[in-house]
Image: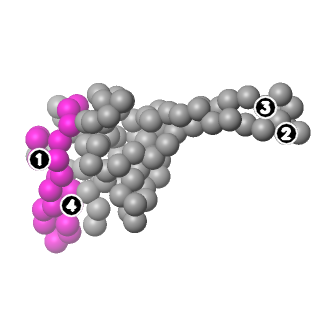
C-alpha cells in the first residue's frame, strides 16, 4: 500500500511552487515522482504542424519528487504525514495530524 495515491489532494512543501495545492494525476513509483495538476509548469516549444500551423509555446506540467509534497489533511486543510492502521480487518491510511481516515 502506498502513502500517496492518484487523486489525492497534496500540497507542495519545497521548491518554486511551495504552498500550492493540487490533485495527483499520475504516480511513477520507480522514479518516486508525481504529476500534480497545476504544479511545476514549464513551457514547451511546439513545432508548426497541421493542427497548429504557427507553432509556439505550450505550458505543461512536469513531475515533482515525492519528498517535496505532502497529503492535505481533510479536517485541518494543512500538510500532514500518513500512517497505516488496522480497522475492521483492513489496512487503511490515516492522517497523522487529525487522525481521520483517508479515502
Magenta part of the chain:
77-98
Secondary structure of residue under mark 3: loop
Q: Main secondary structure of the magenta part?
A: strand
Tell which tag, 4 or 3, sits nearer the viewer.
3
Compute the Cα span from label 3 to label 1. 48 Å
According to the image, label 4 marks what residue?
92
Pointers 4 and 1 in contact (CB under 8 A)?
no
Residue 46 belongs to magenta span: no
Q: Is residue 88 left or right of residue 5?
A: left
Pointers 2 and 3 in contact (CB under 8 A)?
yes
On the image, the x and y values in percent for residue 74 come to 23, 38
Pointers 2 and 4 in contact (CB under 8 A)?
no
Secondary structure of residue under mark 1: loop
On the image, the x and y values in percent for residue 82 come to 18, 52
Q: Residues within 10 Å of mark 3 (few under 14, many from 20)?
A: few
On the image, the x and y values in percent for residue 55 come to 78, 31
Q: Observer-nearest residue: 80 or 52?
A: 52
Tell which tag, 4 or 1, sits nearer the viewer.
1
Label whose residue precedes the other's in the sequence (2 or 1)? 2
Label whose residue precedes the other's in the sequence (4 or 3)? 3
Which residue appears at 45% of the width and 46% of the height? 63
On the image, the x and y values in percent for residue 20 come to 34, 29
Q: Quadrant of residue 98?
A: top left
Compute the Cα span from label 4 to label 1. 12 Å
Secondary structure of residue under mark 2: loop
According to the image, label 2 marks what residue?
49
According to the image, label 3 marks what residue?
55
Q: Residues within 10 Å of mark 2 (few under 14, many from 20)?
A: few
Amino acid at each position: 500500500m502506498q502513502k500517496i495515491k492518484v487523486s489525492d489532494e497534496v500540497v507542495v512543501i519545497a521548491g518554486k511552487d511551495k504552498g500550492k495545492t493540487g490533485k495527483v494525476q499520475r504516480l511513477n513509483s520507480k522514479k518516486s515522482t508525481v504529476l500534480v495538476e497545476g504544479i511545476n509548469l514549464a513551457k514547451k516549444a511546439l513545432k508548426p504542424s497541421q493542427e497548429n500551423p504557427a507553432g509556439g509555446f505550450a505550458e505543461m506540467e512536469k513531475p515533482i519528487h515525492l519528498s517535496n509534497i505532502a497529503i492535505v489533511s481533510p479536517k485541518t486543510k494543512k500538510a500532514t504525514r500518513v500512517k497505516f492502521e488496522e480497522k475492521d480487518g483492513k489496512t487503511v491510511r490515516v492522517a497523522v495530524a487529525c487522525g481521520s481516515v483517508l479515502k
